[in-house]
Amino acid sequence: MTPLYPPFTIGVDLGGTNTVLAIVDSVGHIVAIDSFPTATPDIGTWADILAHKIKDMIRTSDLDGHIKGIGIGAPCANAVTGSIEAATDLPWPSPIPLANMVQARLQLPTVVTNDANAAAIGEMTYGAAAGMKNFIVLTLGTGVGAGVVCDGHLLSGTRGFAGELGHVTFPFAADRPCGCGRSGCLQTVASAKGILTTARHLLSVSSEPSSLRGIPEEKLTAKDICEAAHAGDSLAKEIYEYTGHCLGKAAAEFAALTDPEAIIIFGGVANAGDLLLPPMRDAFSKNALHLYRDRVRFLKSGLEGANAAVLGAASLPMMKR
């Protein structure tokens, strides 16, 4: 049995599709982990479910009275106020006083930050970025987020919103409207939703045989496309080739901002790493300024089970002064 090291904290990764929660010890061992679908009738119901699951997890782990605090990574989270502001990939209206809602239900100190920033902290502490001082984590899931670390410091900004790279616009996405109200955002191509948009377009304009044609459009998922690509489906592979190419072109621009040692992809879409990383590297090499060409590594999350976000969130109470 793996030894456990107090103090213990709880990390919560509030994603657009699923919410993951875990009890974590001081060296990053996950003591217990659970999840539930994020979509609920209202934010109050979500907070009630979370509180119930956390209480049950603490009781089952026999850690009542030993939890230092709760850290939550959430989209568009204001790290100063603990509130979610104008999140486009959550099912409830903003603003949401998230820290206050959770703290009131559990009577534990609660810290909230941007979900991608939490992923970057987890990756730096336990994952592929261990030992690095300059890197970018791109979180590829329901949307696209980013955590940027420069000179060993997480870029936060005035309210914790620095590094919203998923909402940087590019010509290759100019015809794609984003939930933020603009068009051309990177997440309209590189998120799970973006991959589905690319798939529907290619299926409509191409006559190439594909196993994807046997799946009703309304039931098609990014996971289906990933599995088809791994099975050798040429159209599915083309979808990921295009997505990786766009990510590489975007990375060429991001490199000019922070001169990173590595760009790390994390999240559900990143599970297709071997399909995305080669075209990312190729497009980066062709589009990056010569100062950065051949000097940036492209890596998949180094955390087993892709727990970077929940581990990063769990570290927040330890960092809070």
Image: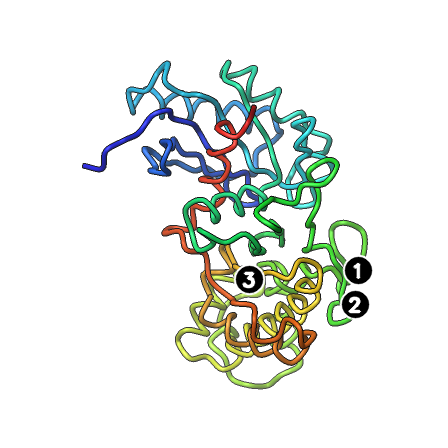
Find residue 39 and report its horizontal and vertical position in percent.
57, 38
Name the side, left or right, on which 156 lies relative to 209: right
Residue picked out by circle 1: 183
- Count of residue discs: 3
Is label 2 or label 3 in front? 3
Kindly report the distance in space between the C-alpha atoms of the residues bearing marks 1 and 3.
30 Å
In three-dimensional space, the C-alpha distance between marks 2 and 3, rounded to whole angstroms, equals 29 Å
Whole-percent x and y of residue 319? 52, 30
Could you tell me how far apart the alpha carbons at marks 2 and 1 are, in whole angstroms?
Answer: 6 Å
Residue behind mark 3: 261
Q: Amino acid at mark 3?
A: Glu
From the image, tell me which residue sits under label 2: 174
The crowd level at tag 2 (other Cα within 10 Å; few <14, some 14-19, many 20+) is some
Q: Is residue 30 above or below residue 162?
A: above
Q: Is residue 284 above or below residue 100?
A: below
User: The residue under label 1 is which amino acid type?
Assistant: Ser
Residue most toward the left? 1
Which x, y percent locates residue 13?
Answer: 51, 39
Q: Earlier in the sequence, mark 2 or mark 3?
A: 2
Of the numbered discs 2 and 1, the one sitting upstream in the chain is 2
Front in this rendered view, residue 187 or 201: 187
Q: Is residue 261 left or right of residue 198?
A: left
